[in-house]
Amino acid sequence: MHSTYSLQPIGILHSPYREKFGIPRQPGLAPHALASVTLLPPYNQIDSVRGLDSFSHVWLIFAFHQTAGHGWRPTVRPPRLGGNARVGVFASRSTFRPNPLGLSVAELLGIDSEHGVVLRLRGVDLLDGTPILDIKPYIPFVDSQPQARGGFVDGPPATLAVEWSAAAAAAVQRHQAQHPELAALIEEVLAQDPRPAYQDNPAREYGVHLYNYNIRFRIDGQRAYVLDVIDTCPHVQGTPAG
């Protein structure tokens, strides 16, 4: 007998990632990605998170809201396999799933309750505005399995060296007061090589949006070059996600 379930967000996540392009493909790969989850009514009461601050990490169960209407695919092409080899959807973390649900772990930095309830997080890999469906504490002795096999993603990905142009270094310095972590975050994101696996043109210039900044870069071999950091909302005073 099949059942139908209705899920409603319990919170909304705010992160530096304004688009899918550039988001690290796993949590924790960009430790300077600060984020927050704002709980929604009626869950935004301090009793809902009583005791959660004794845990260092949390599981976030979320909805792939931007791709939820695209349907699912029985096989997908993981970037880790070069974007060509296919595996079953249930052997991947693809967004195109029968139910558009995702699971991610994040470091819990603290909980603010002055205006509602806000969880401050670090190391997220989620798009700004992601609906959060549930939050659970990360329990090390059961959730961490060092002896587990990782299949085709066994081990962290190789990373690129990151170099800055003089213009980009000067630009990011101007935004240090607003986002002290911005330079480190840019390096962490670009070191993961956010390009699709089939794109390898060292002359091509790319852009990735972090907060209100358009990060212009190119990649040649094993090096990423930050060309410029462009403020897309120069007259808007933004606030850090964390």
Image (cartoon, rainbow, N blue to C red):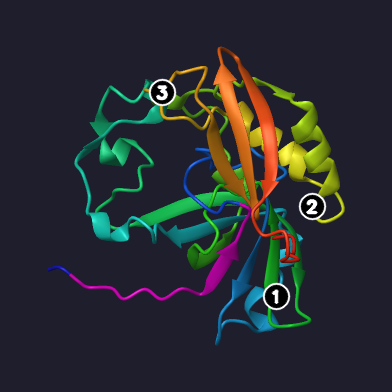
Kindly identify which numbered label has been placed on residue 179: 2
Which of 210 and 121 lies nearest the eye of the viewer? 210
Which of 101 and 205 lies nearest the eye of the viewer? 205
Instruction: Please rate how many residues cluster around mark 1, counting C-alpha atoms within 10 Å: few if below 14, some from 14 to 19, many from 20.
Output: few
Query: What is the spatial separation of the Cα atoms under label 2 and label 3, in whole angstroms?
Result: 30 Å
Residue under label 3: 199
> Position of 131 compared to 53: left or right?
left
Which residue of the protein is positioned furthest toward the bottom in this rendering? 42
Which of 134 and 179 lies nearest the eye of the viewer? 179
Disc 2 marks which amino acid? His
Q: Which badge, 1 or 3, is on the more N-terminal residue?
A: 1
Residue drawn where x is 25% and y is 27% of the image: 86
Residue drawn where x is 52% and y is 19% of the image: 203
Residue under label 1: 50
The local secondary structure at tag 3 comes to: loop
Say whether residue 9 is magenta: yes
Q: Where in the figure is residue 202, as x and y percent of width and height?
A: 52, 17
Instruction: Please rate how many residues cluster around mark 2, counting C-alpha atoms within 10 Å: few if below 14, some from 14 to 19, many from 20.
Output: some
Q: Is residue 29 visible?
A: no
